[in-house]
Amino acid sequence: MARPAFVFPQNFYCLEDDESDNNRLSVQNPTSLNNLRPSELEEFVKGVSFDLSDKELFCVEEQDLFDRVYSLVKEFACLSPGCKLNLVESLRSNLSVLLPTVDSLLRKNDSEEDECLLADRVASYRNAFKIYTFFLIHIVLIEESNSSSNNNTKVVASSRKKQLVSSWNWEPQRARILISVANSLEINLSLLFGSSDPDENYLSFIVRNAFLMFENAAVLKDSETKDALTRIIGTCSTKYHYAAQSCASILHLVHKYDFAVSHLADAVAWAEKKYTDGSMASSLIREIGRTAPKDYVKDTVGAENVGRFLVELADRMPKLVSTNVGLLIPHFGGESYKMRNALVGVLGKLVMKAFDDAEVEVSSKSIRLRTKQAMLEILLERCRDVSAYTRSRVLQVWAELCEEHSVSIGMWNEVAEVAAGRLEDKSAIVRKSALNLLIMMLQHNPFGPQLRAASFEATLEQYKKKLDDLKPKAQPTSVLDGLSSCDEASNDDGEVLNVGEGMNKEHDGSLTDSCLPHEEDMTIQMDDSVPDFGNLEQTRTLVASLEAGLRFSNCVSATMPILVQLMASSSATDVENTILLLMRCRQFQIDGSEACLRKMLPLVFSQDKSIYEAVENAFITIYVRKNPEETAKNLSNLAIDSNIGDLASLEFLIGALMSKGDLTSSTLSALWDLFCFNIAGTTAEQSRGALSILCMAAKTSNSVLSSHLQDIIDIGFGRWAKVEPLLARTACVALQRLSEEDKKKLLSTNGSRVFSILESLVTGFWLPEHVWYAAADRAIATIYTIYPYPDKMAADLVKKSLSSVFDCSGGDELQNGSSNVLTTVQVTKLSRLFFVVSHVALNQLVYIESWVRKIQKDKAKREKMVIEDKSDCTDKTGPQKDNGINAELGLAASEDALLDTLSERAEKEIVSGGSREKNLIGHCMPFLSKLCRNYNLMQKYPELQASGMLALCRFMIIDADFCDANLQLLFTVVENAPSETVRSNCTVALGDLAVRFPNLLEPWTEHMYARLRDPSVSVRKNAVLVLSHLILNDMMKVKGYINEMAICLDDEDERISNLAKLFFHELSKKGSNPIYNLLPDILGKLSSQNLKEESFCSIMQFLIASIKKDKQMEALVEKLCNRFCGVTDIRLYEYISYCLSQLSYTDKSMRKLIELFKTYEHALSEDSVMDNFRTIINKGKKFAKPELKSCIEEFEEKLNKFHIERKEQELTAKNAQSHQQKVDSMESITVAQKEEEEIDESETTEDSEVTDPSTEVQTECSPSEPACSESESNSHAPSEVTDSAIDESEVQSPTSRTRGSLHRLCP
């Protein structure tokens, strides 16, 4: 008898409610497990397991066993781990055994068994198959639900519970269950279900629950479970034609769960591979293509997931996706950049993988190549996408293509030019991708391991000659056509074959190893006998490849100026990737890369740690090598070619390397060998460079120089100093860096010799003029550093310098004025005298201040020791009372005052020598002042003016009285000196004077700001630096001249503009942002100056952008609106309204603007003002809430209304004014006519013989009319005058009267 069929219920518990239908298997008598004790429950489970294993496989359809299994599955979560394991294993093993027996049904059918019995047996197998699947799937669902709830509510469990949980390892059981279900789907189920496809009820249950498990990220982490689910989805969708429902579920999951994207792609790809049926993948692509592009604009998460899904499909099934990619192309025109990003990734995957099938017919191969080329062109076009994210993604795809060698030589340079152009993109992520693309292109370039343009040109020239020799033997063809034949040097799918025969494969290692300098020039060495590359076509291909390589080298070389700018970018990623690109360029010997890399050195002072680390790593990689001799040469050459800023950066780096131990002792020994000429081929410049590096290292570790003191003296001041003059200066620096012990050792052994050398260096003439000043500077500083009594030796230096100029022992000649002296001395010697005297005086001042600091430091130490002694002796109260009295009497303060008095007296002695009479330096000062006032002489000798003004500034820094007396002279020179060097030096000196004597310089503040308008770039730059230093360090108050600094924001020189921007950026960080208070004043000053509108707008835009606080923005709205009051200048209206339009608005500030309408309503007639207010309204609408938005709309209507009314009023006023002018003109003409008539009548009655003057007037005033005849009647004269006056102008009437009156006076 056939048992009731099992039908999958809507949910698990519906099995208990389905009692009405007797044809369906349902639960009749469920067992309540809550009433059972643990032992009874265990026996109950064992009984069920025994029945399942002992009876027939389809025994589960028996009502009693079915009810018991249902009861256990229903309360599965409450079972012990052992019971769970027994139940699961029983059900799963029965299902696994059931599957092979299905095939035996066919064999039994072949025998002569009763068909009715066979039908019943098949029905029983089908029921058991469904029941086992149903219960196992629900066990998985129940256990997963239980585990997820346990994860959400983590409670500290007891040790017993932990042990129980650990004994139940669920994940392997889950994987076995799902694998059994997957295996059951892959057998021939048509024997069970009677058709090729199982019934809808079964497939719906399986697929629905499989997709439900795809929503659990924890389940998908288990590879076996994920693979089983993949097989289930793929089999049901493809084998059993359940694709339509599966596609809908897949797309739903893809839109909702990002973690399921790759796993769903695996399922689709598995189905296509297993059953060679891509219908499901094609349906998914078709459905995505049908979706309106605007739908993805709203669903950004869904768009991103769908895009990832498409890329995963293209990666797994490139050929199938390539045939359906046309359905996706319309999404390139959509607004969702995430979909465009995905399509770009899809095209990249297809180019890499869809066209690599070698076994293709020739006709289809050409079609595939054209398709690939079309995809590459689309990728090139997408580099100009409106979205920065898409542009960045395209460049990333190109980098992947270059890495996979999927870009042909013919397109290589197009990609390189696009990447070079994107380096100037406004978006940082695009610039980063462009830099990475160029790095990848260099690393995987098909042209060889070096890309020096000169080598390419030489090789290309030789092969062109070879090609010309081969041309007569074959048909002549253009060399440029060889680019098209480059495909011969590529594989069948257009992939590049390295023309350099794999020469750059060895350079695919790490960047550290690849940046090693090339001992030999790794170029394609071509002798006169060019190697025979082959026939004409092969030679043409090589020539075309060399031309492409040369073009690529030039393209990368042309980006060097842009890379220098990127190293100054505010984005750390720009700087880091630029450094990496330059290192790669140096590896491939790109022209200009070495010079650009040196410009990264100042970045070591960056506050961004990542930038500093990038510079340090690059420095170590490039210059610090494993070979000590090579490292020494690299560092020496770097020091030789560096400027002052680079040397400071290099010193910082060397100090950091010394601290970390990266500069080894063997490297230091190699530097000493280089300095001492112990290495063959060492030049004097390299020796100086090595000593410079050692001096930098000595700043961190004083012991570096102690072992070679004699070498420093012998080589630094010996014969090599004449070969390399700067070597003596470097030796002086080395002496200054000696430790205290080394200084004592030097004084005891070679003291007299060293000081005699230093003296000869200052007073002698064996150094060139351009080197002497730098060497003398260091020599005098060295004397003050290591000599026990430097003032005595400095006095001898001054006397000898004076004697060399005037050939005398004293300064008597200085009192006689400058006119007689200058006729007998050399300008060069006099310039040197001024330098020595002023530099000695300045070093003496520094020497005094250093001693004052030492005394203060010793005093602080003594006080600290006294305090510590007091704390140890707490029982002695007497000394404490005495110290308290001393403190009250101010004895400690008197000591400080005494020290200040002594230091002031010592500073005065520099000039006066401790008496009223001046010493030698004091006599030089008035002489120098008189000399600098002789403008004619200074203009005749500009080098004397430079030295003299520098000395004058130094003396002014030393003595306040001398400074006060010569300030006017200094400002006169700084404004009128023809030499920009003199003006620059004086500008820098003004900063020092402002620090030293702020009260004296305070009245001259306006003149200091005036240096910002100097025509010289260097002067303006120094002025910006000086004023920035003074203001930011609170040494000068920001006064009403700050507008001069604001003008520098738009300076024509980029360096000055950047310095001004940096100044205002730092100023905005001080306190509550002083720019907020200065902005109205700057606005007023700039509007009164003759600035271009573009300059004004850019300046104010930058300043307003530095104000971030909402309260300050609200206050600025009120301040700017009030500035409209009492203003009649239209240009000022435009400027104020522009500033208002640049503010950031909030609800409060917008309401404040609306409230202050009366202050600016009179300015709304101007179109430009109205445009600025429209900009404000558009800003407000973006953030406004509904209430404020309605107010803004009313405000907009009000503005438009007043604008139209004001325009009409102005037009009416202009018309009225012009009409009034016409009326006044007519009235004046009428009055003039009446006066003329009265005059004519009176003259006629008085004397009839007198000639009518008005006739003469008419003749003279109207020369264009015919002359009046003498017989003409006098009565016609007045009418002629009136007509003439009306025709010409109102001015002629008074003229006529004047002439008439003059005629009346004639006798």
Image: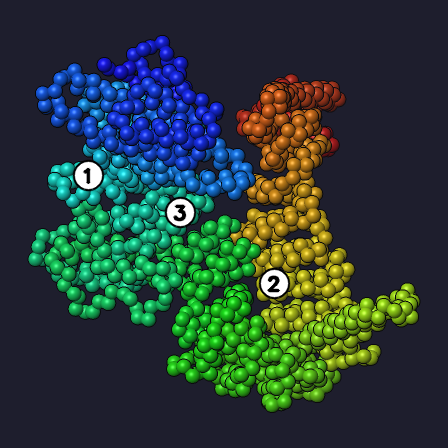
| Distance between mark 3 and mark 2 Cα atoms | 43 Å
Horizontal and vertical percent for residue 592?
A: 39, 61
Residue, x 56% and y 51% (percent of image)? 1057
- Mark 3 and mark 2 lie on one chain; the one further toward the N terminus is 3
The reply to whether callout 1 and callout 2 are in contact (CB within 8 Å) is no
Please give left or right for residue 164 compared with residue 1123 in the image. Answer: left
Please give left or right for residue 98 compared with residue 690 in the image. Answer: left
Horizontal and vertical percent for residue 932?
A: 68, 70
Q: Residues within 10 Å of mark 3 (few under 14, many from 20)?
A: many
Identify the element where label 1 is drawn.
Answer: helix
Residue, x 52% and y 75% (percent of image)? 694
Horizontal and vertical percent for residue 884?
A: 89, 66
Identify the element where label 3 is drawn.
Answer: helix
Residue 182 vertical placement versus 884 (above, below): above
Residue 233 vertical placement versus 506 (above, below): above
Identify the element where label 2 is drawn.
Answer: helix
- Rendered image: mark on residue 368: 1
- Rendered image: mark on residue 984: 2
Q: What amino acid is labelled 2 in the image?
A: Ser
Horizontal and vertical percent for residue 696?
A: 54, 72
